[in-house]
Amino acid sequence: MSFTRREFTRQSALTGAGIALTGVVGTLATAPGALAAEHDGQGHGGHDDHDGRGDHGHHHSKAPGYGPLIADPKGILALPAGFSYRIITHSGVTKLESGETTPSNHDGTAAFAGPRGVTLLVNNHELSGTRAGWAHPVPLTEGLVYDPVAAGGCTVVETRTGGHTAEWVGIAGTSTNCAGGATPWGTWLTCEETEDRAGKNGLLKDHGYVFEVDPYDKRANRDPRPIKAFGRYAHEAVVIDPQRGHAYLTEDASTPNGLLYRWVPPQGFKHGRGKLRTLADDAGVLQATKCFDKNGVFVDDLSRATRIGTVYGVDWVDVPDRDARTVSVRKQFTDTEVTRARKLEGMWWSDGGVYIVSSFARSESPVQHDGQVWFYDTKRRTLTLKVLLGVNADPSKDGAFDGPDNITVSPYGGLVIAEDGEGVQHLFGATDSGVTYPIARNELNDGTPEAPVYSEFTGVTFSPDGKTLFANIQTPGIMLAITGPWKRQPNKH
């Protein structure tokens, strides 16, 4: 059913400026002037016995979160009291089953329940260009290679709590594998964040596609085939609507800013293991968002929303040439035809819709901010602003958060967000009532003592039983398993 501007305007008027259109989804709202709750207490603590595996006394607090972060003597990960971490894979240090070392530049990750208490994780490696440029590219495992000169891909990691870890290649020869998304049928969709065509940057094949990786069945990953129906552009993340079968996809690009896409499956198509690779290149319809406010006025860029609870109606506009044979997909539209956003990043399906991150907005955007999280309600066809981070005045100081990237919906309420901002980098939570709180801080300095550099966090995802939070330090590439006294987060201060 077509959802017209007129209908949205009428509905907004009936429901009071559209705010009631948010339905039952809790509003995750961080005011621009309150980047982090004052009671975060993000101090460095006086505990010096934290060894990355140790356990401190539980921190008792009525405030959301888990209390102050305690500096790690090993210089890897600061955590609250009672929490500990374990290194699962470490680029150049840990080994694959084949004997080669773990590839570098860990990015998007999803966790799947394996047999007998095993967790299977599919881990992207965001390596661009050719293999010659990287010390630890994804190994070219026979039968699993798309483009033999490309450095990126995915590994599959098998782990047990406190026990055995194994790792093997899921796909190789892809480029700039950034985020992606788990499917309802238990596979991983890995996304190439590039538009490089064959012949550019030394590559032999066209890139900028989505590929499916099966963590359970190595044979299913043989002869990798891009899902061309999803389009060729700088992909970031993807989610599948488990009810209707639509795919939602983000694009991380600028000049002009990227787009939020929807892929509508062809009539009669049924999702399932291995089905996406059977699609024709032009199967279904790829569309981009066109938003308008409660007055029916077109919105050119999502950065224009400066108030939590802002609701936009969404139309979908067909993409003319999804494979971008001559013109990038986002450049096939004028600025009056589609709604753009800077740094469209992580996505997560929950609450009957899609949580979508716009990491930050700078001079390429109409209004500056340091992070938005939107919720797209698939039934109402509305986008609602849930989290808004104002511009972080001093990213070098520990306290405020900026640059949300990968996200996951927490089994303990609210969101857990991986920070890819300036300066200090955190994993942080946002409660349903909008309070942000720290979960971890990256203490691995890639720079010098005088000019420290801290890599972004990526791949944030909980184990299927909710007891372990997995996350990556992208550079050099370290996968971490974080455990501790997780608890349901209060909805209010």
Image: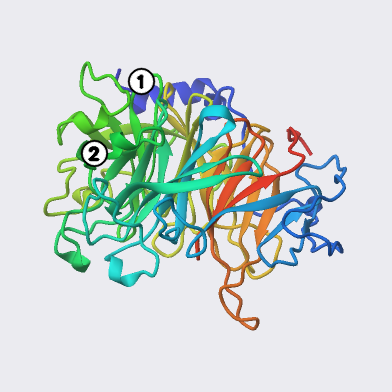
Badge 2 element? loop
Residue 480 image point, x, y percent = 60, 52
Q: Dividing the image into 4 quarters, which one contains the N terminus?
A: top left
Looking at the rendered structure, the kind of residue marked 2 is: Ile
Q: Is residue 335 visible?
A: yes
Residue at x 54% of width, y 46% of height: 165
Residue 129 image point, x, y percent = 28, 65
Asked whether 372 or 93 is in front, the reply is: 93
Q: Left or right? Give the position of 9 relative to 320.
A: right
Looking at the rendered structure, the kind of residue marked 1 is: Arg
Count of numbered marks: 2
Asked whether 474 or 33 is in front, the reply is: 474
Residue at x 46% of width, y 48% of height: 167
Q: Left or right? Give the position of 280 relative to 455.
A: left
**On the image, numbered disc 1 is attached to which residue?**
244
**On the image, numbered disc 2 is attached to which residue?**
227
